[in-house]
Amino acid sequence: MVSDGRPTEAVTAMREAIRSWQAAHAHLNTAICRFRLAQLLADEGDIAGAEMELDSASASFDTLSAPLRAKACFEFRDSLARSHSARDVPY
């Protein structure tokens, strides 16, 4: 959907996937979808929403002992902070 130029639909679909995985008590899949949703939200400029999803995904990855996925959350958050700071620098 994103490649089709329909990012809003992709965000909606990802949120639906999260609800489905939560209902199935599939915690790892839920966290993976939250990470992907964070990427989609960041692409759309919703940094606060992306950070919220990253918080949730990262906490789940820590609980599930998935350190590489938790590290990916940390690295993505760091890249968001760097890109956001770069935009705030007056020229």
Image (cartoon, helix red, strand yellow):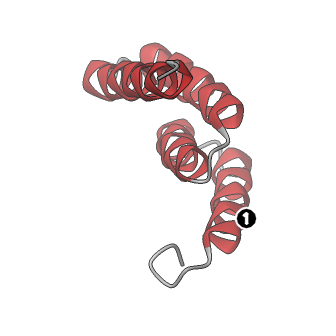
Q: At 54% from the left edge and 17% from the top edge, which residue is drawn? A: 59
Q: Quadrant of residue 20?
A: bottom right
> Residue placed farthest to the front in the image?
91
Q: Amino acid at mark 1?
A: Thr
> Residue placed farthest to the bottom in the image?
4
The 10 Å Cα crowd at callout 1, few under 14, some 14 to 19, many 20 or more, is few
Most foreground residue, 18 or 53: 53
Q: At 31% from the left edge and 20% from the top edge, which residue is drawn? A: 71
Residue 79 picture location, percent across and down: 37, 26
Q: Quadrant of residue 49?
A: top right
Disc 1: which residue? 12
Most foreground residue, 32 or 22: 32
Residue 1 picture location, percent across and down: 54, 78
| 26 versus 85 height, above or below | below
Q: Secondary structure at mark 1?
A: helix
Q: At 61% from the left edge and 53% from the top edge, which residue is drawn? A: 44
Q: Quadrant of residue 14?
A: bottom right
| 35 versus 17 height, above or below | above
Left or right, residue 85 beside residue 52? left
Residue 91 picture location, percent across and down: 47, 23
Left or right, residue 48 beside residue 57? right
Q: At 32% from the left edge and 28% from the top edge, which residue is drawn? A: 72
Residue 22 picture location, percent across and down: 69, 45
